[in-house]
Image: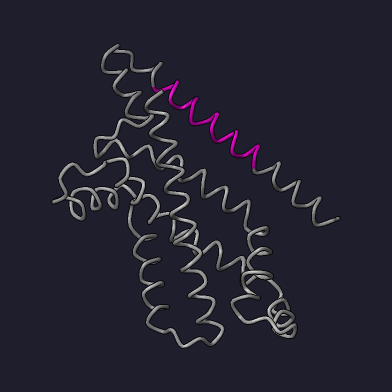
Amino acid sequence: VKGLWATLKMTVIASLLGVVIGLVLSLIRVAYRGGAKIGILNFLANLYITVIRGTPVMVQILIWYFTIFGNVRNADKLLVAAVAFGVNSGAYVAEIFRSGIEALDPGQMEAGRSLGLSYHKTMVKIVLPQAFKNTLPTLFNELIMLLKETSVAGYIGIDDLTRSGQNIQAITFDNTQPLLMVALVYLVMVLLLTWLMNKLEKRLRRSDRN
């Protein structure tokens, strides 16, 4: 149970952090492509996304724990892992949001501006809500990937779901049943998230019709 709780805590914290980072990065990239003079910010955003997406998440979590927080006494391993996973997820969420925003009809922005709304208000009130609806399935897929990626947290000593299964395996000398149970728990969580995604999609479609 403790292992499951640790996995869920990491997933929730990391997903929230990832959405915040991803949203900020996507807005920077979209604004730059729209003509905003933020070349340095756009360069840093591109660099961040390239580095994070081009390196394994396991290496990233080791760097966070042993290098960035290496000199911090009594560092909360679970929090460090959640930050590492969140920073990793942010790069993928940024591309999801960016593609969702750029897929919208440019007339949406023009319509907002013609009504007297500023760029920021048009983005918040018109563009982002539609982009969020369009990217919801992809965001849920990223959440599912994030949930499964937390299984490497045991490399920095966190008793997550996977490591708890390995501990039971070492105690019972049973090489099969504990890991099968871990796999089953992950499968159930993924199925629940998939069910929730489908329910939200149906509700959003009904609201669009109304």
Which percent across, then down, holds residue 77? 27, 41
Please tell me whether the stretch drawn in magenta is mainly helix, strand or loop.
helix
Would you say residue 193 sits in the magenta stretch?
yes
Q: Residue at x 32, y 44 (%)?
A: 79
Which percent across, then down, holds residue 26? 51, 69
Which percent across, then down, holds residue 196? 64, 39
The segment highlighted magenta reads 179-196
Q: How many marks?
A: 0
Which percent across, then down, holds residue 208? 80, 57
Question: Is 115 in front, or is 171?
Answer: 115
Question: Is 87 in front, or is 151?
Answer: 87
Q: Quadrant of residue 104?
A: bottom right
Left/right placement of residue 45 relative to residue 138 reads: left
Left/right placement of residue 109 relative to residue 140 reads: right
Rendered view: 165 above or below 190: above
Q: Quadrant of residue 53?
A: bottom left
Q: Residue at x 36, y 71 (%)?
A: 47
Q: Locate the N terminus by quadrant.
A: top left
Rendered view: 188 above or below 110: above
Would you say residue 71 sits in the magenta stretch?
no
Q: Residue at x 20, y 51 (%)?
A: 69
